[in-house]
Image (cartoon, rainbow, N blue to C red):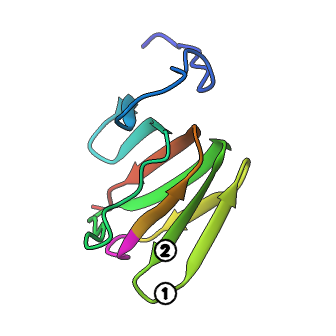
């Protein structure tokens, strides 16, 4: 397997009407993504309820993530959050742009 250098801050479009999701690598247990948000948020009536754990790191920008228990996490550049599987959550704010490193972990 060849090694590849990936700079998560390279080639960032200046704007987009849609969030950009780019899978860097994945296998049956892990998926690593770069997500670029431009002010997008989760619809108020929708809650993410995923079967895998998720680790997010804000590389640039800011974001707020709310849990269904009404707790709110304000993430700034360099902040990370570990979201356990089936923890209902919403993204309620993103700056323009917010660049995320997201790692999804599937437990067997």
- Residue 33 left/right relative to 74: left
Residue range in magenta is 85-89
Across the whole image, how many numbered discs are drawn on residues?
2
Q: Is residue 103 above or below residue 83?
A: above
Q: Secondary structure at mark 2?
A: strand
Residue 85: x and y, percent?
A: 35, 70
Residue at the (64%, 57%) spot, across then down: 80
Residue 46 magenta-highlighted: no
Tell me the quarter of the image containing the N terminus.
Answer: top left
Point out residue 22 in the picture as x, y percentages from the top left corner. Answer: 38, 29
Residue 60: which disc?
none
Residue at left 60%, top 49%? Answer: 57
Whether tag 1 and tag 2 are in contact, CB under 8 A, the answer is yes
Q: Is residue 15 above or below residue 71?
A: above
Neighbourhood count class around disc 1 (C-alpha, 10 Å): few under 14, some 14–19, many 20 upward: few
Disc ID at residue 70: 1
Secondary structure beneath disc 1? loop
Considering the whole magenta stretch, tell me its main secondary structure: loop
- Rate crowding at label 2 as few (under 14), some (14 to 19) or many (20 or more) other CA atoms within 10 Å: some
Q: Is residue 90 left or right of residue 56?
A: left
> Residue placed farthest to the bottom in the image?
69
**Residue 21: image location, x then y, percent:** 37, 34
What distance separates the C-alpha of mark 1 from that of mark 2? 6 Å
Point out residue 32 in the picture as x, y percentages from the top left corner: 43, 38
The residue under label 2 is 66
Quadrant for the C terminus, please.
bottom left
Depicted 45 relative to depicted 80: above or below = below
Q: Residue at x 48, y 46 (%)?
A: 102
Question: Residue at 36% across / 33% down in the picture?
Answer: 17
Most foreground residue, 24 or 13: 13
């Amino acid at each position: 397997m060849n090694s590849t250098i990936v700079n998560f801050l390279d080639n960032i479009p200046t704007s987009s009407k849609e969030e950009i999701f780019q899978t860097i690598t994945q296998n049956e247990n892990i998926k690593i993504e770069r997500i670029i948000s431009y002010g997008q948020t989760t619809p108020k009536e929708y809650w993410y309820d995923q079967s895998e754990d998720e680790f997010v790191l804000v590389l640039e920008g800011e974001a707020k993530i709310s849990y269904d228990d009404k707790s709110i996490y304000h993430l700034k550049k360099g902040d990370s959050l570990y979201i356990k599987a089936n923890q209902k959550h919403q993204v309620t704010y993103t700056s323009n742009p917010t660049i995320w490193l997201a790692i999804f972990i599937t437990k067997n």
